Image (cartoon, coloured by chain):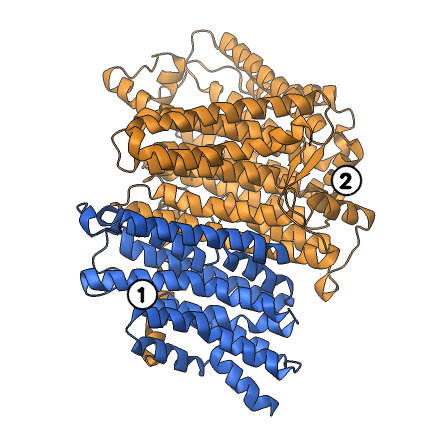
């Protein structure tokens, strides 16, 4: 019963090729709120299933999880469509949950780890939707120059991307540190390499969207209220990072 | 909490508050918003000066904690000294930027980023625990990326900024791994606690039964190499000149020195290593040589400046590799002030040079620019004796003045050796110079050299006493850097022979006696082309990057369903 149970968990804490299911579902959902809900709920289902199994995880799951994380991080590098980009990053990050889970980190901390990745990815999903509405596609390297065209949007996008790629002081950063200190040396190296590739992919995403010559057109930018809303959300994320995940170290 | 502790906390908090205020007020204050940043910079500098004064007056070392497990700042000689340097350079850069950036878009954003960078740097040098250090270390790379790419229209600036960012991120990883190893071994994030535990049992083992000092030392060194542009991790440095000049000044004067600081911060770890400092020395020396060679071969003045910094960083790391940790700090401060001045005054000098080049038509000019050597030469043997003997005498006397046990420290001998080479090179150059009174010229050069050496020796000795007051600890560092005596002698003799042969070759080439040497061969020309093309390292990295991205794209095509 354990093996099928773990397979089911592997669907939600995605292990390749089971991870294809999550990405396929995410791609087929068009509505940004539904996509956001999926990003928030999917890993939590996996963690619920995992906690209900109450078994000692086999060590090969750590390798499988790490390989999945590396695979999707690597694929992230060439991904130019922002919607799929968020899906790949989510897959890569959630697959890393197997490392702390194997080391026996309590489930509430794993929830914080998963949620810490979900929230900035939700912000990015909402921002991608705005781009789709405005330009027909949320695609890097297609138009560029958003920093001048949409300065507020660009600011929020930059901070959200930094939050999603485990930059201090966001929960993702502390989550990665937590996963690192409970890992054995070789998985720890794999985890840091994954982290490095996320940063690379994040920089490529931002460069493909915000950099480039353009005329300012503030009329299409985020409203001041919406910008403050995002700023508040991201600030709360930092506070949560320091107080919740940061205090677990 | 006493007043010193409050000041320790206030020092990085001020630029943070300044960044927040600048952001909030940039709409209403327009260009005047920079006044907030400058005012914050002045206050930070004053606080840093007070803190350094407190250390000098004998105030005890302290650790100020905000959180339980992490979030602490150290108040010690190293953090106080570096704090003053950072706040000083940062203040100058901000004052310079007030007018320099006035015509640029994103004026407020620039000052916000400058303030955040200053805060991150101040936190880094004062970090009392590994988490705080990791946070600031990581954020510096991110902030530098956005500072270098301040002009969001410029794809070139972002492309080169990205190289900096990815190299810095690469350098973050060994530090993260080192932190994990230290926490796993000592169950603490606090640096003073870790250092005490390591000093109590220096042979502590970690994963795979490896000595923790060796593993952590190697990882820290790797992290420092990336941050300080050591060979193979250097390509970002000469190409980041597309960023604003104040950022170049801050980067070359402050940020790039972080490697030397990091090695000094972890000196209690390096004191118990066996082999790591040897590798640090080799990498530093190689970088110093390659950086200098590349600097000389570049036609682009900006790239040349970048490679000059690379060479200096190599020398700084090399100083750590010989155990002269405090000297590396002196070096990074001196280089920071020198290079910062160079960048910030470059615009003004170019402007002045358009009207008058300002180069005096003296002996030096005729020798270097017009390439007119002396018509009458002094006796060869006498000049050779002066060239080789005087620097040795000056260096030995000045160093024996402050350290009678000089010859017990291999590292000190190596640095003396480099000093001797530099001094001899200086005198050697004067041999060909055209002067009506050559003895007067030589005397002046010898006096200048003596002043520089004595000043350098006294200041570096003062740094040693200030940063590492415990002489036993200093001896431990030199011992960790030491090698087998016979190997040491062999290497010194080998290096001396190579240098003297190089001098001889340069001398005969200059005299035009090429019959003794082969004319430049294809091999030599190819080598020059190789150096000029920067050993194709950039091309290799670019090719690798394209390969990785192509592989990623191919994989996405194969796995297109998710």
**Residue for point 35% across, 19% down:** B372
Q: Which residue is mark 2?
A: B476
Relative horizontal placement of residue B121, taking residue B328 as reference (left or right): left
**Residue for point 46% across, 29% down:** B90
Q: Is residue B230 visible?
A: no
- Chain A's shade in the image? blue
Task: Please identify the residue farthest to the front as the structure is shown.
Answer: A225
Tag nearer the camera, 1 or 2: 1
Residue B507 at x, y percent in the picture: 47, 29
Residue B187 at x, y percent in the picture: 73, 56
Chain in orange on the image: B
Residue A90 at x, y percent in the picture: 43, 69
Mark 2 surroundings within 10 Å by alpha-carbon count, few (fewer than 14), some (14 through 19), many (20 or more): some
Quadrant, the N terminus of chain B: top right
Q: Quick one: SS at disc 1? A: helix
Mark 1 surroundings within 10 Å by alpha-carbon count, few (fewer than 14), some (14 through 19), many (20 or more): many
Residue A23 at x, y percent in the picture: 37, 77
Q: Chain of mark 1?
A: A
Q: Residue B430 versus residue A134: which sits nearer the camera?
A: A134
Q: Quick one: SS at disc 2? A: helix
Relative horizontal placement of residue B270, taking residue B541 as reference (left or right): right
Q: Which residue is mark 1?
A: A82
- The answer to whether marks 1 and 2 mark residues whose Cβ atoms lie closer than 8 Å is no
Relative horizontal placement of residue B516, taking residue A82 as reference (left or right): right
- Return the mark for residue A234: none
**In the rendered image, the vertical position of residue B128 relative to residue B95, given as above or below:** below
Q: Is residue B465 visible?
A: yes
**Quarter-wise, where is residue B457 in the image?**
top right
């Amino acid at each position: 019963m354990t093996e099928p149970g773990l397979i089911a968990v592997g669907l939600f804490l995605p292990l390749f090729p089971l991870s294809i299911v999550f990405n396929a579902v995410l791609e087929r959902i068009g509505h940004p709120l539904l996509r956001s809900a999926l990003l928030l709920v999917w890993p939590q289902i996996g963690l619920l299933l995992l906690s209900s199994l109450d078994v000692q995880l086999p060590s090969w799951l750590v390798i499988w999880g790490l390989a999945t994380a590396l695979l999707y991080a690597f694929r992230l590098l060439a991904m130019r469509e922002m919607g799929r980009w968020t899906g790949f990053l989510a897959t890569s990050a959630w697959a890393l949950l197997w490392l702390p889970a194997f080391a026996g980190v309590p489930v509430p901390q794993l929830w914080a780890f998963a949620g810490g990745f979900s929230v900035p990815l939700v912000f990015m999903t909402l921002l991608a939707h705005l781009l789709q509405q405005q330009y027909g596609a949320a695609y890097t390297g297609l138009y560029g120059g958003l920093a001048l065209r949409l300065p507020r949007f660009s600011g929020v996008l930059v901070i959200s991307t930094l939050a999603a790629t485990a930059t201090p002081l966001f929960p993702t950063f502390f989550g990665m540190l937590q996963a690192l200190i409970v890992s054995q040396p070789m998985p720890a190296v794999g985890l840091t390499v994954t982290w490095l590739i996320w940063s690379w992919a994040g920089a490529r995403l931002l460069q493909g969207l915000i950099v480039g010559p353009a005329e300012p057109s503030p009329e299409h930018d985020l409203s001041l209220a919406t910008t403050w809303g995002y700023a508040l959300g991201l600030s709360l994320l930092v506070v949560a990072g320091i107080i919740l995940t940061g205090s677990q170290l | 909490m006493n007043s010193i502790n409050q000041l320790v906390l206030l020092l990085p908090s001020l630029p943070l508050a300044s960044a927040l205020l600048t952001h909030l007020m940039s709409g209403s204050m327009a260009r005047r918003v920079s006044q907030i940043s400058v005012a914050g910079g002045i206050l930070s500098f004053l606080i840093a000066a007070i803190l350094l004064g407190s250390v000098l007056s004998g105030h005890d070392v302290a650790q100020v904690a905000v959180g339980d497990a992490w979030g602490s700042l150290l108040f010690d000689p190293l953090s106080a000294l570096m704090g003053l340097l950072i706040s000083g350079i940062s203040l100058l850069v901000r004052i310079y930027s007030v007018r320099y950036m006035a015509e640029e878009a994103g004026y407020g954003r620039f000052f916000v980023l400058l303030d955040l960078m200053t805060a991150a740097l101040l936190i880094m040098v004062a970090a009392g625990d590994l988490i705080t250090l990791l946070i600031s270390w990581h954020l510096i790379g991110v902030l530098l990326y956005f500072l270098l790419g301040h002009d969001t229209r410029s794809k070139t600036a972002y492309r080169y900024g990205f190289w900096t960012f990815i190299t810095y991120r690469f350098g973050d990883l060994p530090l993260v791994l080192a932190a994990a190893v230290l926490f796993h071994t000592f169950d603490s994030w606090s640096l003073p606690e870790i250092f005490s535990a390591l000093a109590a049992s220096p042979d502590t083992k970690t994963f795979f039964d490896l000595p923790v000092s060796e593993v952590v030392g190697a990882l820290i060194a790797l992290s420092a190499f990336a941050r300080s542009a050591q060979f193979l991790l250097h390509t970002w440095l000469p190409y980041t000149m597309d960023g604003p000049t104040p950022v170049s000044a801050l980067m070359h004067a402050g940020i790039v020195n972080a490697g030397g600081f990091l090695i000094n911060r972890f000196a209690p770890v390096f004191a118990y290593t066996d082999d790591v400092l040897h590798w640090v020395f080799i990498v530093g020396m190689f970088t110093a040589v390659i950086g200098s060679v590349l600097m000389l071969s570049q036609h682009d003045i900006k790239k040349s400046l970048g490679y000059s910094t690379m060479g200096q960083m190599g020398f700084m790391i090399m100083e750590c590799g010989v155990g002269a940790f405090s000297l590396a700090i002196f070096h990074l401060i001196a280089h920071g002030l020198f290079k910062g001045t160079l960048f910030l005054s470059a615009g003004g000098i170019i402007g002045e040079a358009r009207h008058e080049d300002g180069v005096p038509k003296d002996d030096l000019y005729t020798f270097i620019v017009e390439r007119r050597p002396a018509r009458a030469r002094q006796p060869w043997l006498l000049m050779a004796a002066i060239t080789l003997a005087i620097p040795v005498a000056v260096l030995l006397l000045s160093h024996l003045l402050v350290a009678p046990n000089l010859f017990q420290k291999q590292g000190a001998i190596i640095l003396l050796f480099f000093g001797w080479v530099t001094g001899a090179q200086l005198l050697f150059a004067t041999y060909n110079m055209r002067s009506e009174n050559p003895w007067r010229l030589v005397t002046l050069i010898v006096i200048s050299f003596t002043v520089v050496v004595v000043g350098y020796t006294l200041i570096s000795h003062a740094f040693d006493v200030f940063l590492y007051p415990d002489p036993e600890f200093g001896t431990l560092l030199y011992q960790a850097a030491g090698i087998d005596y016979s190997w040491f002698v062999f290497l010194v003799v080998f290096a001396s022979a190579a240098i003297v042969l190089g001098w001889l070759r340069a001398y005969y080439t200059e005299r035009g006696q090429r019959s003794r040497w082969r004319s430049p061969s294809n091999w030599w020309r190819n080598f020059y082309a190789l150096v000029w093309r920067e050993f194709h390292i950039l091309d290799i990295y670019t090719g690798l990057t394209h390969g990785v991205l192509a592989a990623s794209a191919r994989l996405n095509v194969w796995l297109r369903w998710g």
